[in-house]
Image (tube, helix red, strand yellow):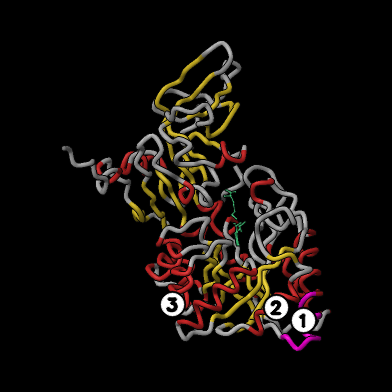
């Protein structure tokens, strides 16, 4: 198992850092999200090394994992945050994040969210459409504020990733078509309550090649230079997030390799002084977490063998939503023999789409523990309570210590705020 260095077998049983996953399951029950603090630091370190000595700010794309302990960890390492809602802003503030390092993305910002971000003093609004620009100018000027603005442009490049997570193509809802951008910048310069500070793009997620980034960068450089010739000078260039992780044997881009090329191009264009902003999500957290689950039943039919586990699509939606592949490891693996079948690992939810992995050859018994790997990103954050299932607990391992960073939801909390209609 090579994908998640902080999750390794020791004495034949799977550990998170120095803590046995079997022990965690006994103590906290399953399903359980387990994060490694050291893995967060490892991933941060890859960006820190890649950006060393340059004017750069990493704004963690917190939709990937918005647990307060995770946000607090990155904040203490110097991270800013890429937010997409008033709720995410509130989480950043609650976690002790610096609002001056927050960029606010998203196609549907509401007036109250704009006001909250102005009150907090965010670094910048990544404006995604012309009507949003007009609304922001109105909200800011009515409140006697100046909103720092970057336009999110859509460079029309193919990130060559899953269509649901590709965002930089003309047919995607995101950003302002790059050809229209100069006109929209001119408008932004005229509107009250706005200060133009940057340009932004985000072309997609789980990108494994450098080429789409560099194509997008070239287009943005061209735009920045054209704006300069009109007297519109930007302070930062935000290249978004999107660097992929290894779920299995993917070759992924190393930040240090990619950003060396990015800086080279910026320097060549005479733009070496621009601040580079990045919004990585998955690559900072994806391989820092696993989802621990227990086999409830083994069920054999003519067509299939099922391992029915206590985690489900409400805990981890990615497999069924994107046909995504997550590694599955037995915590205390048994030897595979000629008689070992392949299993679909499925949850208890009443949907045929409720599966976590398919056709995995594992020697399993009822009661065995499995770890669904690479579950640090877009896992808990996309969870729900479907089938009235309380959301799993989240724990963070730090060397040999364990911290509950979100307890399991109680059954009562599922409906505590609901009311039945009065009768009569
Ligand atoms: C605007 C924006 N920034 C950053 C991210 C984070 O992307 P990733 O997790 O692929 O790094 C996303 C999600 O794709 C996004 O939509
Ligand atoms: N939720 C997606 C990533 C979407 C990125 C958000 N723009 C995933 O699990 O892979």
Please tell me which of labels 3 and 1 falls first in the chain: 3
Mark 2 Cα-neighbour bin, 10 Å: few <14, some 14–19, many ≥20: some
Q: Ligand 1: which quarter?
A: bottom right
Q: Is residue 210 visible?
A: yes
Question: How many marks on residues?
Answer: 3
**Which residue is labeled 3 in the image?**
120
Compared across the picture, whether 238 is left or right of 231 comes to left
Name the outermost residue toward the front.
Answer: 424
Nearer mark to the viewer, of 3 and 1: 1
**What residue appears at the point 39 percent right and 27 percent down from the top-left corner?**
367
For residue 375, above or below residue 204: above
Name the outermost residue toward the top.
Answer: 302
Whether the residues at callouts 2 and 1 have beta carbons within 8 Å, the answer is yes
For residue 180, above or below residue 300: below
**What residue appears at the point 65 percent right and 54 percent down from the top-left corner?**
205
* x then y, percent, for residue 34: 43, 48
**Which residue is labeled 2 in the image?**
185
- Quadrant occupied by the N terminus: top right
Please tell me which of labels 2 and 1 falls first in the chain: 2
């Amino acid at each position: 198992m090579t994908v998640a260095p902080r999750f390794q077998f020791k004495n034949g049983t799977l550990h998170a850092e120095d803590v046995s996953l079997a022990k965690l399951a006994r103590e906290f029950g399953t399903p359980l999200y387990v994060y490694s603090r050291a893995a967060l630091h490892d991933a941060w370190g890859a960006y820190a090394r890649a950006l060393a000595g340059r004017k750069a700010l990493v704004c963690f794309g917190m939709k990937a994992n918005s647990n307060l302990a995770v946000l607090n960890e990155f904040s203490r390492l110097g991270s800013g945050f890429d937010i997409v809602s008033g709720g995410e802003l509130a989480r950043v503030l609650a976690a002790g994040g610096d609002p001056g390092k927050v960029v606010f993305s998203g196609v549907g910002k509401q007036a109250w969210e704009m006001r909250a971000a102005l009150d907090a003093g965010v670094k910048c609004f990544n404006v995604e459409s012309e009507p949003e620009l007009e609304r922001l100018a109105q909200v800011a000027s009515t409140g006697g504020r100046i909103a720092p603005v970057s336009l999110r442009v859509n460079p029309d490049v193919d990130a060559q990733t899953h269509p649901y997570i590709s965002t930089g193509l003309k047919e995607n809802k995101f950003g302002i078509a790059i050809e229209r951008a100069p006109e929209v910048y001119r408008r932004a310069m005229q509107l009250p309550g706005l200060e133009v500070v940057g340009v932004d793009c985000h072309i997609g997620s789980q990108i494994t090649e450098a080429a789409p980034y560099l194509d997008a960068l070239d287009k943005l450089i061209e735009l920045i230079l054209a704006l300069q010739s009109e007297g519109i000078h930007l302070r930062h260039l935000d290249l978004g997030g999107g660097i992929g992780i290894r779920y299995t044997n993917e070759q992924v881009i190393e930040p240090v390799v990619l950003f060396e090329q990015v800086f080279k191009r910026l320097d060549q264009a005479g733009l070496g002084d621009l601040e580079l902003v990045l919004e990585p999500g998955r690559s900072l957290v994806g391989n820092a977490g696993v989802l621990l689950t227990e086999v409830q039943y083994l069920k054999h039919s003519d067509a299939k063998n099922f391992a029915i586990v206590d985690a489900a699509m409400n805990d981890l939606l990615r497999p069924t939503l994107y046909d995504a592949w997550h590694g599955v490891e037995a915590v205390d693996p048994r030897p595979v023999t000629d008689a070992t079948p392949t299993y679909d690992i499925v949850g208890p939810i009443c949907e045929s789409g409720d599966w976590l992995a398919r056709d995995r050859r594992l020697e399993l018994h009822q009661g065995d523990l499995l770890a669904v790997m690479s579950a640090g990103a877009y896992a808990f954050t996309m969870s729900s309570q479907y089938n009235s299932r309380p959301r799993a607990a989240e724990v963070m391992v730090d060397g040999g210590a364990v911290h509950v960073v979100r307890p399991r939801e109680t059954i009562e909390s599922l409906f505590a705020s609901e009311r039945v209609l009065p009768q009569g």
